[in-house]
Image (cartoon, grey):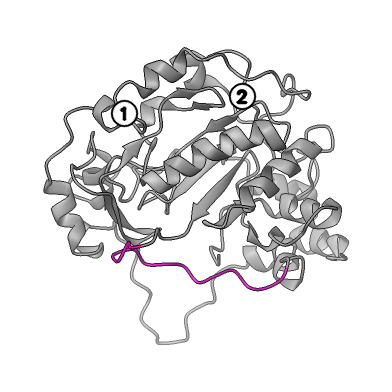
Amino acid sequence: MAFGFAQAFRTLGTLALAGAIGAGLAAGDVGAEQKTPSPGSAKALFGGAGLPTRGPAQPIGFYAKGCMTGAVALPTDGPTWQAMRLSRNRRWGNPAMIALLERFSQDAVKYAGWPGILVGDIAQPRGGPMLNGHSSHQIGLDADIWFSPMPARRMTAQEREDLPFTSMLQKDKFLTVNPKVWTESRARLLMLAASYPEVERIFVNPAIKKKMCDTWAGDRTNLGKLRPIYGHDSHFHIRIKCPPGAAGCTPQAPVPAGDGCDKSLAYWFTPAPWAPPKSPKPGAKPPKPPREMMVTDLPNACAAVLNAASVASMQAATYGGPSAASALAAAPPAASADDTDEALPDVGPVPNDKPAIQ
């Protein structure tokens, strides 16, 4: 594929600009320094809910505008996974999402040569807008998986907070995968994740999508599920379809036919994503400044979700039963990966996460 990189570089004003665009954005922690939400906002209220609701699991609304009931927690440890950034309390999801993650982690060891997955943010206990970091992940059907392999030991809670992200991009080149970091096992991991019928999309950095388009020699049937979007260079984002019978869940339009290695991908390597907003016409009213999302902006049922009774404890709502976390933590971890992330760069050039056209 010829994307005209030289022309894009000249228009953007050299590689230094590409680096500067992402200088203040740590890979994987998009929005970590966002403004503190106001009391009473949807972010503050849903971010303050410590436990999920009782009752059946239901996603309500859209991935970026909704909430959920009956969430379950991914156990912090399993034979083939470890949950990260535990202090965020974001390992909650619809049971269909949690079941997929456990299955995917096992298949990754069996079929992709991966030692186990590190699971990042899924959703808050009752979903809804997060305090920081994401615009989606609101109905329990999204999950972030690190590109770093699971170590061959159980990390402490502090290590899970402090472990740096490892970018798959080169620091000194515009949207280019680092050949010293990227491995075939990571490519296999992505395509395995895309192989499940319930998976709707997988968000990856445009450079990673291009790398897959250029190098993946296996079955390309599911390559179109890999959707390019800025960020997502140290992790990939799995999104599953609305589960059967989830009447309150708003589905996303299916991905276009084909492998996605076309003009829709070339767009991300042009100056267009960084184009400033068009100036208003003379005499036109200036646009209203964005305001915080309130609970009234969400589906009507979300107000009741906030006020619903909680489960008895986190252990009671852990997927697999109250003893699942302690039982799985005692299981031996999978073997180490052939490729390690030691001494590799943890942050690469991550442009602003726009435009969101996925």
Q: Point out residue 78 in the picture as x, y percentages from the top left corner.
A: 49, 24
Q: Which residues are magenta?
A: 245-258
Q: Point out residue 312 in the picture as x, y percentages from the top left corner.
A: 16, 29
Residue 249 is one of the magenta-drawn residues: yes
Mark earlier in primary sequence (1, 2): 2
Apparent side of residue 129 relative to residue 197 in the rendered image (left or right): left
Please tell me whether residue 259 is drawn above or below residue 35 in the rendered image. Answer: below
Please tell me whether residue 337 is drawn above or below residue 260 in the rendered image. Answer: above
Apparent side of residue 327 relative to residue 169 in the rendered image (left or right): left
Disc 1, disc 2: CB below 8 Å? no
Closer-to-camera residue (141/46): 141
Q: Residue at x 40, y 27 (%)?
A: 75
Q: Residue at x 37, y 26 (%)?
A: 87
State which mark lies toward you, 1 or 2.
1
Q: Quadrant of residue 302?
A: bottom left
Closer-to-camera residue (225/113): 113
Q: Residues within 10 Å of mark 2 (few under 14, many from 20)?
A: many
Q: Amino acid at mark 1?
A: Gly
Please tell me whether residue 314 is drawn above or below residue 46 in the rendered image. Answer: above
Q: Amino acid at mark 2?
A: Met
Give the residue number, with chain letter if any, for mark 1. Answer: 321
Q: Is residue 214 visible?
A: yes
Q: Residues within 10 Å of mark 1 (few under 14, many from 20)?
A: few
Closer-to-camera residue (273/92): 92
Give the residue number, with chain letter if any, for mark 2. Answer: 150
Q: Residue at x 33, y 50 (%)?
A: 129
Closer-to-camera residue (222/245): 245
The quarter of the image holding the C terminus is bottom right
